[in-house]
Amino acid sequence: MSGETPVEKMTYEEAFSALENVVTALEIEQHPLDQILALYERGQRLAQRCTELLDKAELQVRQITQDGLVPFDPTA
């Protein structure tokens, strides 16, 4: 797994794509236990990165909304 982009430097799209790859590898490929654990650990870090980036984006949207823009209503 050397040569992979550090999770903390990934964009949301990069982290999500990498997370999908990890899930696929865990679902369909056979790996020794140490590799499974490393994949699982990386998957956890990737999921956390995605959550952090989504939370940051939500905060930005809330700040914009507080500045007078109308909140998005998907049911309208």
Image: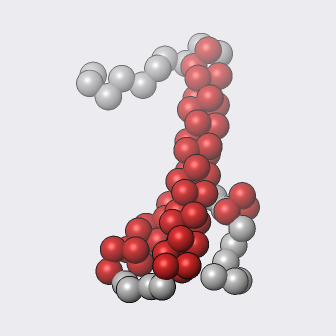
Q: Residue at x 38, y 86 (%)?
A: 30
Q: Residue at x 58, y 49 (%)?
A: 48
Q: Residue at x 51, y 66 (%)?
A: 40
Residue 20 appearing in the image: yes
Going by the image, does 74 lie left or right of 5?
Answer: left
Question: In the rendered view, how is the structure colored?
Answer: secondary structure
Residue 14 on image: x %, y %: 57, 65
Q: Quadrant of the N terminus?
A: bottom right
Establish if 3 lies above or below 54.
below
Establish if 55 lies above or below 62.
below
The answer to which of 45 and 72 lies nearer the viewer is 45
The answer to which of 35 and 61 lies nearer the viewer is 35
Residue 65, by quadrant, is top right
Residue 27 on image: x %, y %: 33, 74
The answer to which of 32 and 41 lies nearer the viewer is 32
Residue 46 appearing in the image: no
Q: Quadrant of the C terminus?
A: top left
The answer to which of 30 and 48 lies nearer the viewer is 30
Residue 35, by quadrant, is bottom right
Residue 45 on image: x %, y %: 60, 57
Q: Residue at x 58, y 36 (%)?
A: 55
**Furthest residue in direction front, as rendered:** 33
